[in-house]
Amino acid sequence: MKAPKSWILEHVDVPEGTSTDELTARLTLTGLKLEAVESAGADISGPLVVGRVLTKEPEPQKNGKTINWCTVDVGDANGTGEPQGIVCGAHNFEPGDLVVVVLPGGVLPGGFEISARKTYGHVSAGMICSARELGLGEDHDGIIVLPADAGEPGQDVRGILGLDEEVIELEVNPDRAYALSIRGIAREVAVSVPGATGFRDPALRDTPLADDQGHPVRLEDTTGCPVFVARTVSGFDSAAPTPDFIAQRITAAGMRPISLAVDVTNYVMLETGRPIHGYDADKVQGAIVVRRASEGEQLTTLDGTRRTLTAEDLVVCDDSGPIGLGGVMGGESTEISGSTTRVLVESAHWDAVSMFRTGRRHKITSEAGKRNERGVDPTICEAAADRVVELLTTYGGASAEPGVTVVGEAPAMPTVTMALDLPANVSGLPIDPDTTVGHLEAVGCTVRVDGDTLTATPPPWRPDVTDPYDLVEEVVRLVGYDTIPSVLPAAPGGRGLTRAQQLRRRIGRTLAGAGWVEVVDFPFVGETDLDALGLEADDPRRTVLRLSNPLSSEAPAMTTTLLPALLRTAGRNVGLGASSVAVFETATVTLPRSSEAAPILPVDRRPTDAELDALVKALPDQPLHLGLVAAGEADPAGWWGPGRPVEWSDAVDAVRSVADALGLELDVRPAALAPWHPGRCAELRLGDALVGHAGELHPRVCTTFGLPARSVAAEVDLDVLIQHAVHLRPAPTFSTFPAAKEDVALVVEESVEAAAVEAALREGAGDLLESIRLFDVYRSEQLGEGRKSLAFALRFRAPDRTLTDEDTTAAREAAVALAAERTGAVQRA
Amino acid sequence: MSGPNSEYDPVEVTPLQAEHVAAARDEAIAAIAAAADLEALKQVRIAHTGDRSPLALANREIGALPPQARKEAGQRIGQARGAVNQALAARQEVLEAEHEERMLVEETVDVTLPTDRRRRGGRHPITLQSELIADIFVAMGWEIAEGPVVEAEWLNFDALNLGPDHPARTMQDTFWTEPADRHVVLRTQTSPVQARTMLTRTPPIYVACPGRVFRTDEYDATHSPMFHQVEGLVVDEGITMAHLKGSLDHLASQLFGDGIDTRFRPSYFPFTEPSAEVDVRCFVCRGVDAESCRTCRGEGWIEWGGCGVVNPRVLVACGVDPERYSGFAFGMGIDRSFMFRHNLEDLRPLFEGDVRFSAAFGTEI
């Protein structure tokens, strides 16, 4: 809300010398946060004075335009007292008029510097200004002609134009709609600025008594519209100009002056907070009826939009049907125009929830709607209407018609009861009962105290005050949030991080320690991303949860895989010239599993466990995934020798090292799954549980994402890993007897997996085997096509004795025999 | 001097004569002294102490002497061999020392050569910032609670006193999932975690909830459709706004430095009443000469988050007895805290995955 300071101070007195800073600091501390203080003339500098036009000689020009060569009396403002010669392109003035003159040396908004310059054959020493040139509005049809009594030539014109006005912009929270008015802000000044007195309520005025002579109004829905006041003025001059103070103030408040009738309703809305609508009374046919619209009913609103209404919308109707969307926007058919002579003034109270829904449904945001949907004082309909009538008669030449229609009545405010010591108990401040009562009364409550209990009736402009804690806030904010002491609460002994939280940190550190860089990306995905991975049509990762209102149609769903974003990120880094990229992300993915709705449960009690269960079950599965992508060099080349390019095993090993950090050993099996190379993809399992996949990316995927060939990736379910993580590891014991080492080289078919050979050796070697390690894979012509030799180093040790050659040989032979049986391995000579 | 001596009187064995022994000894010692390096010394050792050296050969002759002469000859030879061995050992030590010294000089490398044979990794600064914040709460005895990002509408709004027609719902631009009548949203705040905590546990509750949240904000230097928030919730007997202030002051001082505290301004949030905006004292200028401070832009305070006393309506919906318990809640942006803590003006580097950005923070912040 932007409020001219002078307008606020018309309705409340602050101690002499209270600066704008002090005023706004207090308002900020009590809940109306200062956004900015602006002044309309802040970007105008130099001499800007009243001038009296002495002569005006029209001079037609070759280009078809006519300019006026004028002499203007600017008093002593030019230093000489001589008339100032100025060329002016406008024609809407006559000699003798008072105008606004900016003299050489002045600067207008936009950094427009004024100097004496030669133009149209004259030296023009300054400029006669229009409203737009001064930043006072859009009016550029002519220059500003000041009222005859505006001031003396040479006098500074800023005060006259309101250019010295400070405009205070305050942030108004949605619960405090009353502060969307000068009335509300002045009231806040009165209660929050020390020494402020004399609040003068602009809505407190004597209004004529209701009678049955006014325009007939019938309310069919008194919940939606409990009060409707109608007044009519006739003889209105629609060409009458808006007085400067109204135009200036509504401009300062951020609204645009349009016409007197519209400007007056806006002015009264800003002043009282009560939105008003004006109809061309001659276009209203018959009695006004307020009702809910019929489904599908049509209405063309003031903005020229033809709207189809629903049964929830409140409409104002006449004999022709709907003529306005009640409280939100008027209709085109009864709009005030240049030919309007009778104005019907509507000042009605509307149900806030209906306003909110209608505004949202029809996507209408307006100053009136903003107030109506937050809640307006229902008791000031008559006063606001009367104020509009007053201004229309004063400035529009109109006269009030005698009838006064008042239908319905303002709903009573519900009372709120609280324990008298609640403010103290909630705030931790020693707030005594007198302070509580005093502050509640200051904000307008009617207060009654019975023993330990306080009952307050909030004022009608505070529909937000419904609960005891609302009363507490009113008391505490006036006592001052800055007085609340700082006391650290003593929590009971905590359990620290959960095991899962600790393990997640461990995983991140493990990967960072191994040279991987963590990134964070948005979880949105699109069809093209999934296509780019090369997913099959029936891949479960294509079953995504779609968003109704995605930011981008390219990525309209929640992702099921971290890889698209990681691949893009890796590609971007490669594009930026990184020769080595290894990125990882840990984030949840979204796997839809249910088509059930998540019920909207009651809020006046705890939902039952069954209700909560239904709620949680309706949500998608959201496992925590780890994704990683590496490209380029695994180890860089350097003075030490050549580097090593990334290869499939880097991805598998990254996941294995994560598992190792959790005390787990993964089973690795070949698999074929997009986006991996079908011959270089490993499936990682923990027994029956699938953990994920790792390996080299499919060459097409590398190309699509701008990655070098042989880039690698992995994606695993961390929840599975964390569930299986070994918690208590038994301490190992080691034999101190000497170890015996044996190497064996086994020739197998190419298709035999190394892990299978190793497993057979391990099992066959028995308990004496301490460790086994594959140290070479060898292929040669001698071995023959399609065969490979796997060389293993076996280490044997007994817990209780030194092994003999016979022991070791027997164990080795048993190992080789089992490997031969299981995998067809033949020991190399 | 080879072979057993049979032609001479054994008493007259020349090699055992004193002058011969002394000559052999002196010759050996001179050769030792002349050995320039360990290799030369090794040759000298072979020549003068080896099996075929004069002193060794002389020693072998002792047996040929009459018994009464053996003792003297033995002593003579023994002393001579002792002197030679001593000289050898001494020279060995000197030469080894020289050798080592020379080797160390020769083996000098340029230690300024690059040593980065392995990639350096790093964790994302927002992860690190979240962990740092979590640690502060854990140190206070609080626990860290978590919940899903795709959340039930009821938990994100209704349970938090944001009914379907609450004006505050328009303050938060929510991502809805299809179809909208399934009432599933991307959480706009981490508050549903608070609701889940109250629904599943009994007070006393002291939890902090860091996590990702979503709003339909177009992505620019100061807005992101996804960002990170941390919220705190305490529900216990006798909890007041003073406890709220104390907790936030503690968090501020731990995160931004000793003496950094907070200030409250009245505000509005549906889930708290009374509600306040929290400003944190500028940790750069501390409010002194704030005019020229780039961090707080002359305010002396930085807008940090929102807080308040848990609205009893929220307690009721979450199954907590408001007559017995009261609580407070607060929330602030982790990204935003990171941005002003680390002087980052544009948030986009946080989400664009340039490895140079994350790597710059290593594994701790």
Image (tube, coloured by chain):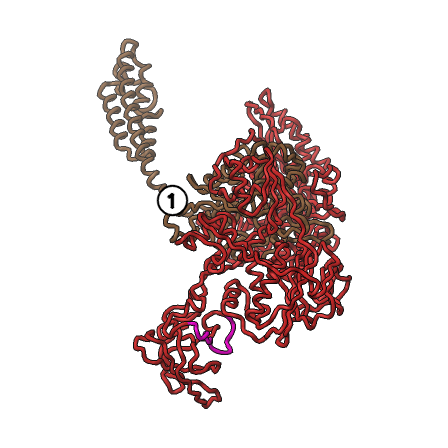
Q: Which residue is mark 1?
A: B111
Chain letter of the red region: A
Q: Is residue A503 visible?
A: no
Chain letter of the residue beneath label 1 in the structure image: B
The crowd level at tag 1 (other Cα within 10 Å; few <14, some 14-19, many 20+) is few
Looking at the rendering, which quadrant does residue A734 occupy? top right
Report the residue at 57% width, 36% height from top: A422
State the count of labels: 1
Q: Is residue B240 above or below residue A74?
A: above
Q: Is residue A451 visible?
A: yes
Q: Position of residue B76 (x, y in %)?
A: 26, 17
Q: Position of residue A766 (x, y in %)?
A: 66, 28
In this rendering, position of residue A300 left or right of residue B286: right
Q: Secondary structure at mark 1?
A: loop
Q: Position of residue B250 (x, y in %)?
A: 48, 38
Residue in front for this viewpoint, A468 or A693 = A468
Report the residue at 50% width, 69% height from top: A244
From which residue to which does the magenta span run? A137-150
**Three-letter residue code for mark 1:** Val
Chain letter of the brown region: B
